[in-house]
Every structure is written in C-alpha cells, then in structure tokens.
Image: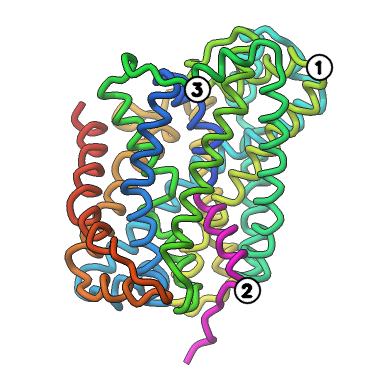
Amino acid sequence: MGAAREHWGSRFGFIMAAAGSAVGLGNVWRFPYTTGTNGGAAFLLIYLALIIGFGFALAIAEMLVGRSAQRNPVGAFRALGGRGWPVVGYLGITTGFVILSFYAVVAGWTLAYIVMMISGNLGTTDPEALNQIFGGFVSDPVRPVLYSAVFMALTGWIVIGGISHGIERWNKVLMPALFVILLVLVVRSLSLPGASAGVDFYLKPDFSKVTSQTFYDAIAQAFFSLSIGMGTLLTYGSYLSKDEHLPKAALTVVLIDSGVAILAGLMILPAVFAFGFNPSAGPGLTFVTLPAVFASMPGGVFFGVLFFALLAIAALTSAVSILEPMISYFVDEHGTSRHRAVIVAGLVCFGLSVPASLSFGPAADVTIAGKNWFDLMDFLANNVMLPLGGLLTAIFVGWIWKAAENELRNDGRLHLPWVPAWHLVLRFLAPIGILWIMASALLF
C-alpha cells in the first residue's frame, strides 16, 4: 500500500486553490481585450450566461470524477470507466505540458514588466514607442527565456511543498492578495476623469454589436476560463473528502472566476477610455496600451507595478494547478517522489517553453503548418486539446458513468432537484457548445 492520499486542510484552502486554478491570465489579460473587441456590455452578458449555464455543470463534473475516484486523471477515468477511458486522463496531462510551454512565456513577460515598470523604462505615453519596447523585449533570445525560467522555478517551488503545505498554503496568501490589488486598481481606474465613458461601454449593452463571432468568443472565454478539460479541477477534486458539498464549492469557484473577470474589465476599460486609447487593441492592450495609461496618470509607476504583480499572481496560481495533475499522475501511477516528479516535469515544461519564447525572435521564421511554435501550441491547446478533453468529460459523466447522478444526489445533506437539468447540460448542451468551438476554429 502506498502512502495515504493528501487532502486539503480546510474548505477555504480548497476554494482558494480551485479559484486560483480558474483565475489566470485568461481573466486579467484575455477577458478585458476580448470584451473590448466585441463591443463591451453585450459580450459581458452573453459570457456570464454561458459560464453559469454550462461552465458550472462541467466544473461539477470534473470535481465529481476526481472526488469519487480519489485519483489522478488517468487513474480516475480507469477506476470509474475502465477500458479506453484513461486516454481522457492522458489527454489532460499532455494538454498541461502543451499549455505551460507557452503560458510560462507570457507569465515571464509579466515578471519582466514589473522590473521595467520599477526601472522607469515604460515611462512614455507614446503607444508606438511602447510597441517597440515590447517588440524588442519579446524578440530578445535571452531575457524572456530567463524570466520564463524564474516563473517555472516559482511554480515548482510551490507545487513541491505538496497539497496542504504548498498549494493550499500559498493560494491562501496569493488569492486574497490578488483581490486586494484588483480592488485598489478598480477604485483608481473609476476615479479617473473621463472613466464614465468606459463604464458605459462596459455595463450598458448595445446588442446591435452582437455577431456570431461574439457568441463564439463568449463561449470560448467561458469554457477556457475555468480550465475545463486538462484535469486541474479533477485533480483538485481528488484531494477532497467525501463529505464536501461539491455543488456549493463549484458554484463558489465559478462566481469567483467570473467576478475576477468582471472586475478586471472594470479595472482596465474605464482607464483606457479616460485617456482616449482604443479598447479593441487586442492582446497589445496589456503590454502596449496599459503602460501608456499608467504613464499618463499620477502615481502611474506604483499602479503599473501593482497591475503587473496582479497578472503575475494570477498566472502563478493557474500554473500551479496546471502542473499538479502531472505530478499527481507520476506519484500515483509510477510511485515517483513528489520532489523528483516536480523537478522532471518542471524542466520538461521549461524546455518546451524555450522554442515558444524564441518564436518571437530568432525562430520567428520557423513554422509548422504556417504557425510558429508559440502559435501552434496555443492553437492546439485552446482549439483542439482543451475542448476535446471537456467534450469527453461531459460524455463520460453524462452518458457512461451510471453512478454520476446518485453520487451527486448523495452529496451533502441537501436535496438537489436540479440534478436532471445538470445531466441534461452534460449530455446535450455542453457537447453542442464545445463542438461549435472546435468546428469554428478548425473549419472556418
């Protein structure tokens, strides 16, 4: 018999860790610019409807599989499904390696921008100059790689401490810190002269701006924001005791995740409008437009440092959750020590991040299927691997695992009259939405 499986030390610790897995660069970096390019408030409403409509159902499904089996993604699908179902677990673990290969690169940029903000290198309001600074940094063959290495080392250091003494302990510090920084920045943004135009854009819906692309971006954001499909919530669920009330925990995570996204938009878009910048600047909104915003406001260096620290914390809590399913797999299935598993997996992820980082510099012309390494990994993860993992999980819990409803009905001490509706979402609505994401990305 192996060592007893670790469990969370407290419900609060689990909620902070699970919320940390969902709250990441997708909330603070991707959500505001996606909202900006899709016309603001109408996109926000559609996104909220979708994340509550089927993101919540999928989050429960993943946690339920993990808690019931008390195993890693591969072991959980083997125990509950048998036959070929462990392949879903292997897919999730592989997806984690692919995602960290480019996630660590962008996370490294956030660390670099903290340093550049402190040193005063970003003290200009000229977007063109800031664009050159950003381009010069990301194309450098050395500096971004070093920052990615620092980020992966921080991630590994937290994970190596285990569940209660590593992941839980640090999420109980990092997540409250994230909320405090976020709220400070929201208050500062709303206090700027002219911010009301950004608030109107963000909170007053104009449905004439809604297109099919709006729905696609909203459903993709809702799906990917919760980290569905790569085994993170499943693995975190496996460290839960059987008496944890799962629907309440899942709902709390969904509300925190969407709440952070909403606040991130309220932090960024009013400030962008206040200084007359373009809210539909795309990914450059974070690393080009926002430094110009900070340079334009009193105390901009202080608030700029806070903002990029916020990004780094969000990236770190997510990266920890992406790495943990790999570690759980090697510890459970192969008897590897946690220390060795973290070192080996961390080094592999960092090794994969090097060509992703060089994709913006020396290896920019090296392409596969017309995409550089960074874009290829991003495309495979977000448009193929994550949706496929979510689709197979929905099918498994909705159609294959016959005990799923009873397992959920026995959860806690409350009668759950909505369980048939939850099952309906998993059987039909979620698969349709996920197939739409995949078809839109691959065929159009």
- Local crowd size for mark 2, using a 10 Å CA cut-off: few (<14), some (14–19), many (≥20): some
Find disc 3 in the rendering and name its residue: 202
The answer to whether the residue labelled 1 contacts the one labelled 2, judged by CB atoms less than 8 Å apart, is no
Q: Amino acid at mark 1?
A: Pro
Residues in magenta, as a range:
1-22
Residue at (30% x, 29% y) in the render: 215
Q: Position of residue 106 (x, y in %)?
A: 56, 36
The answer to whether residue 183 is left or right of residue 241 is right
Q: Position of residue 39 (x, y in %)?
A: 41, 18
Mark 1 element type: loop
Give the vertical position of 243 relative to 173 (above or below).
Answer: below
Mark 1 or mark 2, earlier in chain: 2
Q: Return the residue nearer the eye: 108 or 126.
A: 126
How far is mark 3 from mark 1, CA to CA? 24 Å
Mark 3 or mark 2, earlier in chain: 2
Residue at (58% x, 34% y) in the render: 263
Give the vertical position of 150 relative to 331 (above or below).
Answer: above
- Local crowd size for mark 3, using a 10 Å CA cut-off: few (<14), some (14–19), many (≥20): many
Find disc 2 in the rendering and name its residue: 9
The answer to whether the residue labelled 3 contacts the one labelled 2, judged by CB atoms less than 8 Å apart, is no
Mark 2 element type: loop
Residue at (56% x, 48% y) in the render: 350
Q: Residue 298: which disc?
A: 1
How far is mark 1 from mark 2, CA to CA? 43 Å
In this view, which residue lies farthest toward the bottom?
1
> Does the segment drawn in magenta span residue 17?
yes
**How many marks on residues?**
3
Q: Position of residue 238 (x, y in %)?
A: 45, 72
